[in-house]
Amino acid sequence: MKIAVVRFPGSNCDQDALWALRSDVGVAAEYVWHEATSLSGFDGVFLPGGFSYGDYLRCGAMAARAPLMSAVRDLAERGHPVIGACNGFQVLCEAGLLEGALLLNHSQKFVCRDVRLRPETQKGLWMESQSQVLRLPIAHGEGRYIADRENLSRLNGEGRVAFRYVDSAGDATEDANPNGSVENIAGIVNEAGNVLGLMPHPERATNARIGGTDGLVLLRAFSAMKV
Amino acid sequence: MGLSHDEYGLICDRLGRTPTPTELGMYAVMWSEHCGYKYSRPILAYFKRYKESLEKNSLENAGLVDIGDGLAVTMKVESHNHPSAVEPYQGAATGVGGILRDIFTMGARPIACLNSLRFGPIREGEASPETVARNRYLFEHVVAGIGGYGNCVGVPTVGGEVVFHPRYSGNPLVNAMAVGMMKIDEVTTAAAAGIGNPVLYLGSSTGKDGIHGATFASENLTEESEARRPNVQIGDPFAEKLLIEATLEALQTGAILAIQDMGAAGLTCSTIEMSAKGGVGMEIDLDLVPMRESDMTAEELMLSESQERMLCVAHPGREQEVLDIFHRWGLPAVVIGRVTSGDRVVARRHGVIEADVPAAHLANECPTYVNSPQEPERFQKDRSWSPDAWPDVSNGSEALMTLLASPTLASKRWVYQQFDQEVQTQTRVRPGAGDAAVLAPRGTQKGLALALDGNSRWVAADPLVGGQLVVCEAARNVACSGAKPVAVTDGLNFGSPQQPEIYWEFDQAVLGIARACEALQTPVISGNVSFYNESELGPIPPTPMIGMLGVLEDATRSLGLALGPVPTRLVLVGYKNSVRQQGLGASAYGSEVRQEEVGCPEAPQLEAELRLTHWLAEQAYLSRFTCAHDVSDGGLAFTLAEMAMPHQVGIEVDLSTTSLLSPDLSRRDAQLFGEFPGWVVVGLAADTNWDLLQESARSAGLHLIELGEARPNSNEFKIRSEGQEVIRLNLDEMCRQYEGSIPRCFV
């Protein structure tokens, strides 16, 4: 297993992802420049957070059209795991690999804090156990997930909502929703289940030294996913 | 332009002719207070390391701290007060951008930002409705600007402070601090060298923004300042992020011989300083500079403060390697000139020489001025003030609730949640969780503790003592996090130095800081002076801000301030004070509860402070504490409240024996809210041997006083003294007050 960590100009969680995968998850990982056109030799893709292309136009809009994205699409279609965290989630939505969009937070402000996530699906086997509530950090200005009614009912009906923001009791309350996302949705997967997009940062919670290891569950599943 | 008649004379004499408009502009910025330190240089000589390195012309290396493991840390504070007063978002954003460039231009990767902010009151009734609205606008947009820039460049904002006071209404303060880390043998230089070597312009193109920003920073704010809006630079954090990556990558090739950022005074400052440092000259062709508008004049090009630009000298024949890297990152990069022999910086536009000036004259020979300091009249009155003027506190609970509701003392969650505190995944103790932020950098066991602190109440009342106190407090903050304090960067914000009383404040405060830094073995490695912080409302209070770096031998032994989920013994650590005004002079209790700013702060004992900070770091390393928090604004009661609130842990303490530390302590308000230097509250780890701890404290000349217990199952905050209950509050109530203070101003 070898994972490509994509670097767009303006990505800023690329190093964190690379380190987390290599040192804490223990899987091979390499940077791939946005202008590359091939992902040959790679088995999975990590689209990191940041402000790709300075968030110009719309978050993720320019990155979704970067040369490398056709290779990412190919890999995804062949069933390889692809994860997009934060800006990476925005890129996946803009690229049409996932439904919906991410808008300015309800508070109109950037928000950085820990959230609790309740796993909602076993699709793609990102989470072995659905009973484990994860505590992961978020850091975004545009994380309010929306989808139209049709897509929303498909996501719910097909079990493709991956995570919801919940409170300490495990309930998806309004107070537990940090950005105003519809139905407290924090992350979703594609139909096949191999593409996951989420606003929280699993790569920021892989080491007790910096306060948390809940991201490891997710990234270990990612690196172990069979094609 | 800010040059005096005499200064103009000096320039004509040196050039042997009248300067061209471009040259005059160059002199005006280089000889502004912002760049030339006209009034501050003589007084900054109090800082030993600064003085020595100035004499040895080695200021660059003075800015490095060797933390072992082959690693060095560098840090610096910079003010962006005036731009933020007229254009808060961009003013604050470019303040962050500028200080980050100061760090990576040394070859260090920026690993953390902090900020220290001052605004006028934001609570209704504390100023006129228009002023409150204006202050809120400035506060909200400054915070957004800092976040907008720092979040995008991917450098975590890990700490800082915000204070509100009527005297900042006309002139807010925005000081940004950045910290960088590098391999110690990879430090770069700004000294140009090698006759004929190519000079490269790197980064964003040059526009007409920010022209004369440095001169703007060196005058008072007036109603006309609004017209200065075009002098404010516009930041592009995306370009900065690319610039960081491209610069650090290019430095790794070894093709760069010398490099400097284009900060204040842009091309002027970078060409002049690099030449002066290297004892060489430079010839540049301004036609080659990437421009946003083609009709720019030489003067505009030389003085523009367009952001996200660097200047470098490459080794001969290796310029292409540098250009290629920048182009790959999508940034302009072009050779604009050569290093020359001699000492002149020559700039051509359309083939005509528009400037031909002696570099060292502009860089190093800015005339300095010494004013005669004058002690203000009120100072003697404050010194002889006694708390006997006040009746003792009648309701301790009510007084504590008043303190908790003060926006200055209350939780800053509303602020720091807007900052990415964790990108780069090295943040171990986040804002609000400890007295200092703690980073656990990759590649070393060690941890870095960072604090940025100021207290203008203390400094305004007694600049000499206040200057010492802010250093001691910052040192205590990093020590409470488990680190040994090792170095200081300072941001010195004052009014006009041409006023004798303000010059006195500056002189005394810097002397106080210098003495404390020497005693605490924390040299001042860098700093910034911001004068002319005055408006129609008068000068700001003297506001030195101290950025403190501490080092932990093992990052995982760091401490936060919050009491945890197990019953914990609470102990007060300190040295014996002899107090003049029972900790109530210039206290938060005075200004917030008594609504009177009178008296002087208590003086610290510097030698005892050194022992205290080292002892705290040692005990933290031995895992003897679960948490630690120093006593500062609001005294012991407020400190205990801040430890109890995060996880809503009830406490029951008795303050009767605190008088062992201060024999003159007779008043209840002093016991609860007095601000005594050198006091720290610690929570003992369950397995800590009390006798051993006592023994080691005694040998460090420190005293331990048992206060009581923290009770995780209780929701009550109870303080007793001499057999009476003096505070009894419910933690929910306290948290609502403390957490809601700032958000309540924005509903």
Image: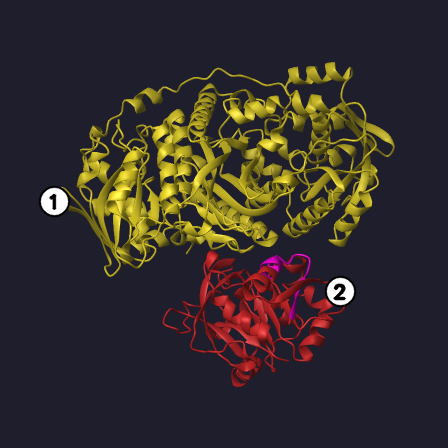
Chain colours: A red, B yellow
The magenta span reads A2-17
Residue occupying the point 20% across, 30% down? B663
What kind of element bears circle 2? Answer: loop
Residue occupying the point 49% across, 35% down? B487
Residue B384 placement: quadrant:
top left
- Disc 1 residue type (three-letter): Gly
- Disc 2 residue type (three-letter): Ala
Q: Are marks 1 and 2 on the same chain?
A: no
Residue beneath disc 2: A36
Residue B20 placement: quadrant:
top right
Residue occupying the point 65% across, 51% down? B241
Quadrant housing the C terminus of chain B: bottom left
What kind of element bears circle 1? Answer: loop
B422 shown above or below B335? below
Q: Which mark is residue A140?
A: none
Residue B142 is inside the magenta segment: no
Measuring from the top left, give residue B549's x and y in whole percent: 48, 40
Residue B571 placement: quadrant:
top left
In front: mark 1 or mark 2?
2
